[in-house]
């Protein structure tokens, strides 16, 4: 009946290729198996796992998120190109919003303490992280920075990322809100050119709108581009210098609840 | 990751910023592959496997993970383990978004702008396409 070329008494091979196709032969007959012999010792087994894979940063970000939750903190990750006004926004926010609600800042740059010095004038707890060559903050750096801060009574933690519209998109810091800034000194089409970071935002701020007219920056066109890429994001237009739109930003901050 | 290895592998990387960016991305994929192999070897031990034949990953088209970099990382992290020489299969999960206005899910295959095919409005509600998942493994 069977056409196995193997002599009687030889068990099927354990070669993975053959084990995987065994026992169906081209003609439907059992291959490599002699009638009366026991089933092969090893057949390929398949196991369904369906487990999400996290890298080291994702795990550390989860740990930060848990830490922020325990402390009753809302953490915001501020991301933009260099020079979009992250530090200026925080200076004014600490001065005004920070008067009633205690805030703290972790600020990242490749070099210098300059941003931290600017922000410390508000007497809020501020720590500077210098990343050396790294073009973004990661969860481990943030955990290190946070451990150096006195967070007593702090309700809002701002994390000012390294100025960069690309890499910070891939690094979760454990924040509950990602804020992306787009300034009037940049092009209206930034969201179309750097979509991942805008896609990941809960809030997009169009900043420096006080000088938009002089620069010929079309705020409405910029807002349209944000809505195309990031319709999920709350959009606020403001100027940290003139104060225009700042109330809306503070109202948003006030509406945030710890995780 | 030494720059000269990256350059050999990807000769198109012609400036340092680009190389640095790619190295960052590769570190991400290596980290993901390490957790995949940890889970695979864990399963293999539980089942007293002698050899892992096949590993299947599901990667969303908008996950930000590069399949090519995953393959590169795979050889490095499986060397000397039960999974050395296993086949790595990467299944791509197409992005799908949801339009709240129309109540329909649609394929979001036109880049980063998810526009509902019915009403043309933009959606930020991605329902599928961010997966980075160890789907199944096969061993003997």
Image: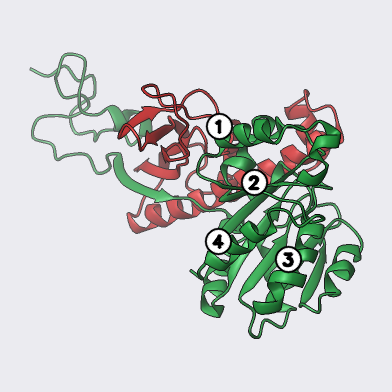
Q: Chain of mark 1?
A: A
Q: Which residue is mark 1?
A: A228
**Which badge, 1 or 4, is on the more N-terminal residue?**
4
Circle 3 packing at 10 Å, graded few (<14), some (14-19), many (20+), is some
Instruction: Identify the residue position indicated by label 2 in the image.
Output: A169
User: Image height check: is A172 above or below A38?
Assistant: below
Which of labels 1 and 4 is toward the front? 1
Estimate the spatial distance between the alpha carbons at disc 1 and disc 4, rounded to whole Å: 23 Å
- Image depth: mark 4 or mark 2 in front: 4
Relative side of A97 to A231, left or right: right
Q: Look at mark 3 in the image and give the residue it sits on.
A: A93
Locate the C terminus of chain B by quadrant: top left
Residue A109 as seen in the image, left or right of residue A71:
right
- Name which residue lies at 81% across and 58% down: A88
In the rendered image, residue A101, in percent from the top left (x then y), is placed at 64, 77
Q: In red, which chain?
A: B
State the separation of the CA atoms marked 4 and 2. Answer: 14 Å
- Labels 3, 1: front one: 3
Image spot of residue A24 (x, y percent): 20, 24
> Between residues B33 and A124, which one lies in front from this camera angle?
A124
Q: Earlier in the sequence, mark 3 or mark 1?
A: 3
Give the mark, 4 or 3, whose residue is nearer the N terminus.
3
Badge 1: how crowded within 10 Å, few (<14), some, or many (20+)? many
A170 horizontally vs A120: left or right: left
Q: Colour of chain A?
A: green
- Calculate the distance from the C-alpha at mark 2 to the C-alpha at mark 3: 24 Å
Determine which residue is flagged by label 4: A176
With respect to residue B140, does A104 lie above or below?
A: below
Element at badge 3? Answer: helix
Q: Which-is-in-front pick, marks 1 and 2?
A: 1
The crowd level at tag 2 (other Cα within 10 Å; few <14, some 14-19, many 20+) is many
């Amino acid at each position: 009946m069977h056409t196995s070329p193997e002599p009687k008494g030889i068990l099927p091979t354990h070669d993975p290729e053959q084990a995987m196709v065994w026992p169906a032969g081209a003609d439907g007959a059992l291959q490599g198996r002699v009638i009366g012999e026991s089933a092969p010792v090893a057949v390929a087994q398949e196991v369904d796992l369906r487990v999400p894979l996290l890298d080291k940063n994702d795990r550390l970000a989860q740990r930060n998120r848990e830490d922020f939750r325990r402390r009753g903190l809302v953490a915001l990750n501020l991301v933009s190109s260099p020079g979009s006004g992250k530090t200026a926004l925080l200076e004014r926010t600490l001065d005004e919003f920070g008067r009633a609600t205690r805030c703290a800042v972790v600020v990242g740059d490749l070099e210098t303490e300059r941003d931290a010095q600017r922000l410390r004038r508000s007497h809020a707890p501020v720590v500077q992280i210098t990343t050396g060559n790294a073009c973004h903050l990661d969860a481990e750096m943030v955990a290190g920075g946070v451990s150096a801060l006195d967070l007593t009574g702090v309700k809002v933690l701002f994390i000012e990322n390294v100025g960069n519209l690309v890499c910070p998109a891939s690094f979760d810091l454990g924040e509950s809100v990602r804020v992306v800034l787009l300034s009037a000194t940049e092009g209206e089409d930034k969201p179309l050119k750097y979509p991942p970071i805008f896609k990941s935002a809960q809030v997009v701020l169009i900043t420096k709108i006080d000088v938009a007219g002089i620069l010929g920056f079309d705020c409405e066109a910029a807002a349209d581009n944000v809505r195309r890429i990031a319709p999920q994001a709350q959009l606020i237009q403001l100027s940290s210098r003139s104060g225009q739109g700042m109330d809306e930003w503070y109202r948003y901050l006030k509406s945030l609840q710890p995780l | 990751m030494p720059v000269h290895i990256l350059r050999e592998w990807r000769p198109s990387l012609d400036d340092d910023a680009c190389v640095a960016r790619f190295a960052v991305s590769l570190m991400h994929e290596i980290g993901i592959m390490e957790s995949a192999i940890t889970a695979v070897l864990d399963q293999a031990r539980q089942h007293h496997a002698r050899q892992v034949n096949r590993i299947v990953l599901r990667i969303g088209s908008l996950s930000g993970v590069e399949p090519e970099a995953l393959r590169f990382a795979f050889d490095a992290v499986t060397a000397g383990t039960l999974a050395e020489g296993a086949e790595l299969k990467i299944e791509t999960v197409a992005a799908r978004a949801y339009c709240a206005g129309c109540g329909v899910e649609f394929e979001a295959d036109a880049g980063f702008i998810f526009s509902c095919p019915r009403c043309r409005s933009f959606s930020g509600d991605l329902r599928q396409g961010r997966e980075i998942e160890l789907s199944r493994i096969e061993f003997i």
